[in-house]
Image (cartoon, coloured by chain):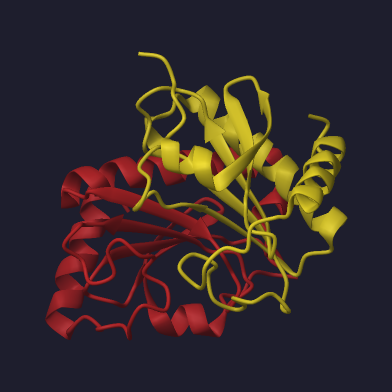
Chain colours: A yellow, B red
Amino acid sequence: MSFELDTTLATDSLLLGTNGDFMLRLANDSRYIWLLLIPTIAGVTEIHQLSPATRHQLSDHSANLSAILMAEFNGDKFNIAALGNQVAQLHIHHIVRKTSDPAWPNPVWGHSPAVPYSAEQRQAIVSRLQRILSL
Amino acid sequence: MSFELDTTLATDSLLLGTNGDFMLRLANDSRYIWLLLIPTIAGVTEIHQLSPATRHQLSDHSANLSAILMAEFNGDKFNIAALGNQVAQLHIHHIVRKTSDPAWPNPVWGHSPAVPYSAEQRQAIVSRLQRILSL
């Protein structure tokens, strides 16, 4: 069985790049710097289903992402979450939170409808993220 | 600086045990199997501030917890999250989700007020968790 990206994830986010067994995407909500780290391994819905080596790689990618995004976007707090109640395919949210953002101090999920990036904004943010994340 | 547990975390959860650099607590909400994994390292608010070795230990503890809790409580999905918007001290939520639970399919945070365990329930669930988690 080969990996196929869930159609909801594909629709609601933009591809930033791939790195080994992981795909990195940007949630299409211009109000947050909100990335999705997705292991490109078929049939995985929980982190504990990954091999220990892949789990540790996930931890390393996640920490690298967090440190870079917090510094670049001057975040107040970083949120990391594997939920999957709506889309079971494993995807780990990485979100730069600011005390001035719309959902603060609550979680972003379910707070309010996404505000998609315009075509111009999209090009700018994707390029910026690809540059700082070396994708 | 020595580690001191945040007072909100201390109030809202019950000690299950400690294991090396980690403390394990049970959120005092009888509607969910909801554990908190807390690195007992002073001043840490983000996972990426941990050393790589401690991060990998965290990943191992987390995966072990997830696998055991999902099997024992017959969960439909497992939620793992490091948020910290309300309490900055690093604590990682581990929650067995069921399609029949009150908040499903939404996140549990902010859904509705906790329903604390009774004294009897508390003793039973703490003992059961300590047994299955070998604490």
Q: Residue at x 80, y 36 (%)?
A: A130
Q: Residue at x 37, y 62 (%)?
A: B35
Q: Residue at x 45, y 68 (%)?
A: A110
**Relative image position of residue B118 (x, y in whole percent):** 17, 84
Front residue of A109/B77: it is: A109
Picture quadrant of residue B40: bottom right
Q: How many marks?
A: 0
Instruction: Determine whether, in the image, residue A105 is placed left or right of residue B74.
Output: right
Instruction: Determine whether, in the image, residue A65 is placed left or right of residue A85.
Output: right
Q: In which quadrant of the rendered image does the N terminus of chain B lie? A: bottom right
Q: Residue at x 41, y 14 (%)?
A: A2
Picture quadrant of residue B67: top left
Q: Residue furthest front?
A: A119
Q: Residue furthest top?
A: A1
Against B90, residue B19 (above or below) is above
Front residue of A64/B24: it is: A64
Q: Is residue B133 visible?
A: no
**Relative image position of residue A66 (x, y in whole percent):** 72, 50
Picture quadrant of residue A100: bottom right
**Relative image position of residue B109 (x, y in whole percent):** 42, 73
Q: Is residue B36 visible?
A: yes
Against B37, residue A102 (above or below) is below
